[in-house]
Amino acid sequence: MTDKQAYLQYVNRRAARSPVLRNCAAAFWVGGSICLGGQLLRALYRALGASPDAAGTLVSITLVFFSALATGLGIFDTIARYAGAGTLLPITGFANAVVSPAIDTKSEGFVLGVGAKIFTVAGPVLLYGTAASVLYGLIYWVYVLFS
Amino acid sequence: MGHIWEFEAPARVLSHASAVGREEFLGPLGSLFDYHDESDRFGAKTWEKAEGALGATVFNLALGRAGLSHTAIDLLLAGDLQNQCVASSGGLSVFGVPYLGLYGACSTFVEGLLVSALALNAAQPLSRVAVVTTSHNCAAERQFRLPLEYGGQRTPTAQWTATAGGCLLLERGRQGVCLTAGMAGRMVDGGVSDAANMGAAMAPAAADSLVRWFRESGESPTDYDAIITGDLGQEGSEILSDLLAMKGLSLSDRHRDCGVLLYDRARQDVHAGGSGCGCCASVTAALFLPQLLRGEMRRVLLMATGALMSPTSVQQGGSIVGIAPIVRMEVLEK
């Protein structure tokens, strides 16, 4: 095992894997519960007279608000350590990804700290999400042109 | 030509101190530390400054235990995990003691002990030297990984940077607990590039140092009461055992790892165990040194392990170089 590749193989073979099934189950029920909560909120906003579009937006705003609050109170990471993708994938994960660097970098000032570093985690999602939507728009535009 | 330095004048441990944060205090060694701060803040406003304050705390505690003023210290050797070692300079500059900043990642504590022995063995030696190393979980998470409140999961091989610091004061002398020999580690690149498996990245360097030590000294692990490693964690400790077995060396029941001892892995969410410059320093000062002072152990080998990397080097896919300096501590009678 003197050579690097053999050592790497040995290391990878012996390293304990993350408990995938347990993680999936946790993600399923926590993520599902968040989505169910979103659906109930939507029904509530609809019942209060919001249009379908407005109700959807209000649901997002509400979920983002509570994620940001939970992040600030230091609860979010505790839940996420258990729930994994269950809290990461819904809009709750995105809110946490923006708020957590904002809290962290406050000590470096509002311009070079919070201002410059707030998107260090969410940045890739913003960049490639925006780029993908432009690409999708172009494809759709070409599709409409020829059909 | 050998690599082991036998110190002509042993460096005697004059005083020691340790301090930790909340998670470490809640661990199995909690009651042994001289000081702990439930808030992890150590009176400072930022995590980075908190690490500096932690260094100043252990330095003050060690001075107090020896009944000395900082003016009695001729050289301060300190290091931490922050970029440009700012925790050490920020926290310890107020003392005005001549200073050398050290960086050996998590191996810095033993690196400091080696340099201190050199200073005490110079042709015109210094009389008293202090070694201080610290690490802070929050400062390290921010610098090396993700924001503190970010919600994510970690792999089972990941380690937890300890919020901890330790200080030893040393002087020339051959009575009590003394450093009698040491050896610098070789930088060993095992090819591991996963920063969530630092145990595997450091184990080859640890094995290299131990094999060289026992081959050159002619000693065997049973000549020691304990062979202490800094922060290999559970994963790295098991790998070390495998690597040594291939070289025909067994540490048997002598091996202790500070990273494994610092937390209760079943109860605390630290995965493979603790890491950081303060891990080895605090556990040595709180657990092993008192055992030597009480005569429960006579002779130990202390080997800190470091993973030499930066966030940039890891992101660029570079492999993590390991390092493992060794120092021998033994109880000498006059």
Image (cartoon, helix red, strand yellow):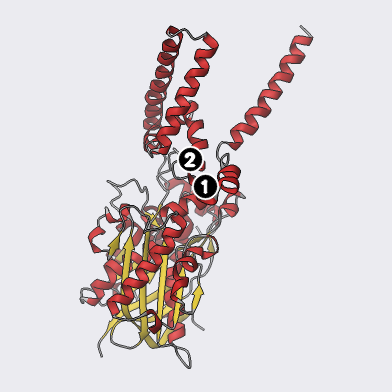
| Position above or below: B206 against B71 | above
Relative image position of residue B46 (x, y in whole percent): 45, 54
Q: Quadrant of the C terminus of chain B?
A: bottom left
Nearest the viewer among B321 and B242 is B321
Marks 1/2 same chain:
yes
Q: Residue at (47%, 67%) from the top-left corner? A: B88
| Label 2: chain letter | A
Viewer-nearest residue: A24 or B132: B132
Residue occupying the point 34% across, 67% down: B228
Side (left or right) of B222 relative to A145:
left
Q: Decide which of tag 1 and tag 2 comes sooner along the chain.
A: 2
Task: State the residue position of label 2.
Answer: A100
Pick whichever, B137 or B54, lies toward us.
B54
Q: Position of residue A21 (x, y in %)?
A: 39, 30
Q: Secondary structure at mark 2?
A: helix
Q: Amino acid at mark 1?
A: Thr
Relative to residue B27, is residue A48 drawn left or right? Answer: right
Please tell me whether mark 1 sits on a helix, a strand or a loop.
Answer: helix
Tell me the chain of label 1. A
Q: Which residue is mark 1?
A: A105
* Camera sees residue A16: yes
Q: CA distance from mark 1 to mark 2?
A: 9 Å
Residue visible at 59% across and 32% down in the picture: A125
In this picture, is B161 found above or below B294? above
Residue A116: quarter of image: top right
Hey, what amino acid is under mark 2? Answer: Ser
